[in-house]
Image (cartoon, rainbow, N blue to C red):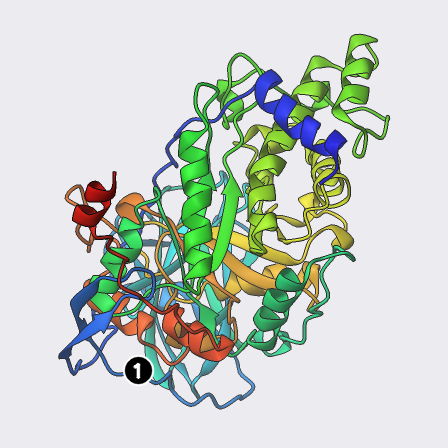
């Protein structure tokens, strides 16, 4: 790194207008239902941790094969009239709204009752479920298959019958229960139509392994090639660490006998002290040296006096920072001059200072040859974070500024860029990112499954040349369902806190049963740390006894 760039990093730490704090993730929870695991054969043996030199006794488990019913594609199209499946006296059959089929439609939803369609399908396969519904307001509907909640959707508020389809729902041959409920009482259901799904078979895994940064370093290229080679074959395990102690990873190891291959963390710094951030960077370096993959995201507090990641808690807006001047590769002295001349705003200068601060931290990993799965500006389309609240165009300006400054000016060639905008509207140029990802948190009463609908939707507008990953989740996906639904995420990252642990640091089973965690971490379809090390040929460093000096002789000689 040349002197001008080194000066930019150092001065940005001194002049920065923003700082990071340990802000809490909004808690979104899920409770996975029982019955997902069959008999487990348990053994106990002594296992040496892959990351520490401690010897810990843990239970180990056999490898669970990926299993699901054989899929037999078959054409189907069958309608079930709502008025023919009343089993609850709260419902009424009416005819006042025009446009219905059959002899009428059903009303009387009160938030608790279920309209249960008893259906029959010819084969094990994925089906599209289309409901014909009328509603005067936007109402949240929940769908259950055989008494298991599988998903939700919102109705239109047009007051006329329209079709709403859930794509790719897996049903087994024969009879099933498909039940619908709602949180509103002005909804009318005309019919349910079931047809065979054709979209999931179009999902593919022939991605381009070439990194967007033409000058990417060897370690980043090797990691990207590995991810590409194993895309569609394994789901690589990942866990967010709340601090540098890796307590979440140790808990997973103590329960499953396995460790995640990827250690994720969210960089958060403070104006008063950068110690915590640098401790996290050191923990990343340790993880890599001991054979793991490093993943980082940035909880970027806005560069203003009311600093926060959340748009509602800060007055900072990207729209006040944008400029037509290309500042991406200017020195900080040049940019400071533009600010002094009034050619760029205080907000623009603050953004540059923060980007340079972060580049300085990432530089220490580059200097060690450590590749990083780098995910900045996440969940932008949700607009709850300030970097997405000003709209897609301003978001794209900020993304391009950060990408260019980090890759070209600071020459950070160790970053694999993950775009996590979460919608087509917020897509950035394809030559500025390498992996597309989704963050998916679901309600406590719904099983997590594969989340195939998000996978399919993302690949539909991203294309098959990009890897697709589950960058944040409230539960790890069910690996059997992932392969059954042809939605094999490149990797997942389970968030910390209540999604994994309770207040005492033990597993919080109200979100994910212990047996579920065991089965999916020991599945033949997941790649854990030991499997990753085996495939990459990692060899742990030799442990040598520390040298002990003869202190008595030394004291004599002095």
Mark 1, other Cα within 10 Å: few <14 / some 14–19 / many ≥20: some
Find numbered disc 1 in the image and state the secondary structure of the residue it sits on: loop
- Which quadrant is home to the C terminus? top left
Q: Residue 294: x, y in percent?
A: 49, 55
Q: Residue 183: x, y in percent?
A: 35, 43
Rendered image quadrant of residue 243: top left
Location of residue 79 with respect to 550 vertically, above or below: below
Taking the spot 70% from the left edge, 65% from the top edge, the residue there is 463
Location of residue 253 with respect to 46 vertically, above or below: above
Q: Is residue 253 visible?
A: yes
Q: Is residue 220 left or right of residue 88?
A: right
The residue tagged 1 is 64
Q: Is residue 162 visible?
A: no
Which residue occupies the foreground of this view, 190 or 451? 451
Taking the spot 54% from the left edge, 60% from the top edge, the residue there is 469
Taking the spot 54% from the left edge, 45% from the top edge, the residue there is 156
Q: Residue 421: x, y in percent?
A: 61, 45
């Amino acid at each position: 790194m040349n002197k001008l760039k080194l000066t930019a990093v150092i001065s940005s730490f001194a002049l920065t207008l923003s700082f990071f704090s340990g802000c809490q993730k909004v808690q979104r929870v899920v409770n996975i239902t029982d019955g997902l695991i069959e008999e487990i054969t348990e053994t106990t043996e002594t296992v040496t941790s892959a990351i520490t030199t401690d010897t810990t006794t843990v239970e180990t488990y056999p490898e669970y094969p990926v299993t699901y019913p054989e899929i037999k594609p078959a054409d189907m199209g069958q309608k079930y009239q709502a008025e023919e499946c009343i089993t609850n006296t709260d419902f009424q059959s009416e005819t006042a709204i025009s446009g219905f089929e059959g002899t009428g439609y059903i009303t009387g939803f009160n938030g608790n009752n279920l309209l249960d369609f008893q259906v029959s399908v010819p084969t094990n396969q994925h089906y599209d479920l289309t409901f014909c519904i009328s509603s005067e307001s936007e109402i949240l509907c929940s769908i259950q298959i055989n008494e298991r909640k599988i998903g939700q959707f919102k109705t239109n508020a047009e007051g006329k019958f329209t079709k709403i389809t859930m794509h790719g729902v897996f049903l087994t041959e024969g009879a099933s229960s498909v039940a619908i409920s709602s949180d509103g009482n002005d909804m009318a259901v005309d019919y349910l139509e079931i047809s065979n799904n054709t979209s999931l078979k179009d999902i593919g895994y022939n991605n381009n392994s070439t990194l967007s940064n033409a000058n990417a370093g060897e370690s980043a290229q090797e990691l990207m090639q590995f991810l590409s080679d194993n895309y569609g074959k394994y789901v690589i395990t990942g866990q967010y660490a709340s601090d540098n102690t890796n307590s979440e990873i140790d808990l997973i190891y103590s329960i499953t006998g396995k460790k995640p291959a990827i250690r994720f963390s969210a960089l958060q710094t403070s104006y008063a002290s950068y110690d915590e951030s640098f401790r996290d960077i050191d923990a990343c370096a340790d993880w890599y040296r001991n054979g793991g993959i490093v993943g980082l995201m940035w909880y970027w507090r806005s560069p203003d006096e009311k600093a926060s990641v959340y748009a509602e808690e800060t007055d900072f807006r990207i729209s006040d920072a944008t400029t037509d001047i290309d500042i991406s590769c200017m020195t900080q002295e040049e940019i400071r001059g533009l600010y002094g001349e009034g050619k760029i705003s205080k907000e623009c200068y603050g953004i540059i200072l923060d980007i340079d601060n972060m580049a300085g931290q990432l530089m220490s990993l580059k200097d060690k040859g450590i590749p990083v799965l780098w995910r900045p500006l996440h969940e932008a389309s949700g607009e709850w974070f300030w970097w997405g609240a000003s709209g897609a165009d301003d978001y794209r300006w900020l993304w391009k500024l950060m990408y260019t400054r980090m890759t070209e000016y600071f020459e950070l060639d160790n970053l694999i860029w993950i775009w996590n905008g979460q919608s087509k509207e917020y897509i950035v140029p394809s030559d500025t990112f390498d992996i597309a990802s989704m963050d998916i948190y679901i309600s406590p009463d719904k099983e997590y499954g594969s989340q195939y609908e998000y996978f399919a939707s993302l690949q539909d507008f991203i294309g098959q040349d990009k890897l697709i990953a589950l960058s944040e989740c409230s539960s790890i996906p069910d690996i059997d369902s992932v392969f059954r639904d042809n939605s094999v995420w490149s990797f997942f990252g389970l968030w910390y806190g209540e999604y994994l642990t309770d207040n005492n640091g033990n597993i919080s089973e109200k979100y994910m049963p212990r047996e579920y965690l065991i089965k999916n971490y020991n599945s033949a379809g997941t790649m854990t740390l030991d499997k990753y090390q085996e495939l990459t040929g990692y060899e742990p460093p030799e442990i040598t006894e520390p040298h002990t000096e003869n202190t008595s002789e030394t004291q004599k000689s002095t």
